[in-house]
Image (cartoon, grey):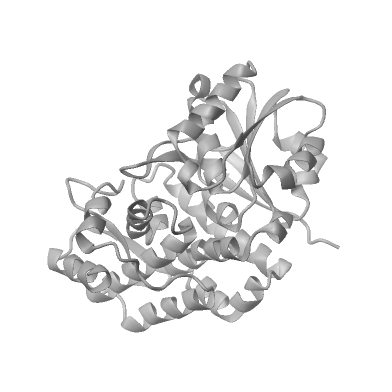
């Protein structure tokens, strides 16, 4: 018998919505009726996910006017062109402001669809139905939407909270091992920045999580969503605290851009970025080198990349200058005070950053 659905609530003050986590949500007509409003819907998915899950979602959504927009799969398609395709579909099917968009897929689908929902007629409702571990623990929650630009990751976007999130853990059964590991990078991140006990728990249970133990996967997703809900409730628009969720991401986004968004999955780049951020924290005397080693070992167990690509220090620093945390020309980093607690650092010796990049990227 499947475990009962867990529900976590995000409350930003002006928006409150449920994150449901459990098996069978995509076929749960009652949940879809209660949480997906509107007589007209547009389902946005991609060429990989739609053949697997679109029909069962359509059945659960019941008798409504439902259109679909199927995007190409992959981070390289997280573009204005894809967002435009969603907007074109909304116009073509004569959707109005009371329509609801349903994002069925991973982080790219959720980000593109959410951005289109934020833009269409100045904002329509959307529901996230994430089908990857990374999307279930991170990108589907919190209302960040957007697309990439050749000059940098997520440079174009909007804050637009979903109406609900349905994290159906059954979808993880079809997730390739590489995608599962990439999602675990974000779970490890939460242990680094917020919950040392979660990090300890991952060290003990990661092998069984990789073996797709349903109860452990659900626990990892639920705890990750709890942490993100707490952070988003305090700082929806990333004015201060929410930036800690970007631990490792300043480096990761630059690595993704430098490699054309094609060499690494997002979680793989985050794994590399977290190692760099932890090393930088140690070089600044904030944490012991033993913490850096613990993180590296956990990432190795998860079979995530630990060797840096041959990009060049100058190129990486150039791309980091486009990071959204840059203020007055200074790159701010999310670094560790200790395992389980992060802070945003905007003052540091430039020589320390130059040394870090030179040692890792030449």
Left or right: where does residue 118 sit relative to residue 59? left
Q: Is residue 334 above or below residue 163?
A: below
In the displayed image of the protein, which residue is found farthest to the right?
1
Looking at the image, residue 47 sits to the left or right of residue 348; the answer is right
Residue 6 occupies quadrant = bottom right
**Residue appearing at x 37%, y 58% in the figure:** 252
**Residue 30, position in %: x, y?**
81, 39
205 displayed left or right of 79: right
Location of the N terminus by quadrant is bottom right
Find the residue positioned furthest to the bottom.
Answer: 290
Q: Nearer the viewer, residue 92 or 224?
A: 92
Q: Position of residue 33 (x, y in %)?
A: 77, 34
Query: At 45% across and 70% down in the image, what residue appears?
Result: 305
The one nearer the camera, 17 or 207, is 207
Q: How many marks?
A: 0
203 relative to 23, above or below = below
Q: Is residue 360 above or below residue 110?
A: below
* Residue 336 visible in the snapshot: no
Residue 137 visible from this viewpoint: yes
- In the foreground, 214 or 20: 214
- Identify the image quadrant of residue 34: top right
State the quadrant of the C terminus.
Answer: bottom left
Q: Quadrant of the rendered structure where residue 361 is?
A: bottom left
């Amino acid at each position: 018998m499947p475990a009962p659905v867990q529900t976590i609530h995000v409350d930003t003050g002006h928006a409150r919505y449920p994150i449901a986590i459990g098996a069978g949500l995509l076929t749960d007509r009652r949940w879809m009726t209660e949480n997906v409003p509107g007589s007209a819907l547009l389902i946005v998915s991609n060429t990989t996910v739609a053949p697997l899950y679109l029909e069962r979602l359509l059945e659960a959504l019941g008798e409504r006017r439902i259109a679909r927009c199927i995007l190409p799969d992959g981070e390289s398609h997280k573009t204005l062109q894809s967002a435009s395709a969603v907007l074109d579909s909304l116009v073509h099917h004569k959707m109005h402001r009371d329509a609801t968009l349903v994002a069925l897929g991973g982080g790219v689908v959720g980000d593109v669809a959410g951005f289109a929902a934020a833009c269409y007629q100045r904002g329509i409702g959307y529901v996230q139905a994430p089908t990857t571990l990374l999307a279930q623990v991170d990108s589907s929650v919190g209302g960040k939407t957007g697309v990439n630009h050749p000059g940098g990751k997520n440079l174009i976007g909007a804050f637009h909270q979903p109406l609900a999130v349905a994290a159906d853990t059954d979808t993880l059964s079809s997730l390739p091992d590489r995608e599962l590991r990439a999602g675990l990078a974000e779970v490890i991140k939460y242990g680094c920045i917020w919950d040392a006990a979660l990090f300890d728990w991952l060290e003990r249970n990661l092998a069984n999580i990789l073996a797709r133990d349903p109860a452990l996967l659900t626990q990892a997703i639920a705890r990750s969503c709890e942490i993100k809900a707490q952070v988003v409730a305090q700082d929806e628009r990333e004015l201060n605290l929410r930036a800690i969720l970007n631990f490792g991401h300043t480096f990761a986004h630059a690595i993704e851009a430098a490699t054309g968004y094609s060499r690494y999955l997002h979680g793989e780049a985050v794994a590399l970025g977290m190692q760099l951020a932890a090393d930088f924290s140690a070089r600044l005397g904030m944490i012991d080198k033993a913490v850096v080693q613990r993180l590296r070992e956990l990432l190795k167990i998860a079979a995530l990349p630990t060797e840096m690509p041959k990009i060049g220090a100058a190129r990486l620093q150039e791309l980091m200058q486009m990071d959204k945390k840059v203020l007055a020309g200074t790159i701010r980093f999310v670094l560790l005070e200790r395992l389980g607690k992060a802070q945003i650092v905007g003052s540091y010796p430039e020589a320390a950053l130059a040394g870090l990049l030179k040692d890792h990227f030449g």
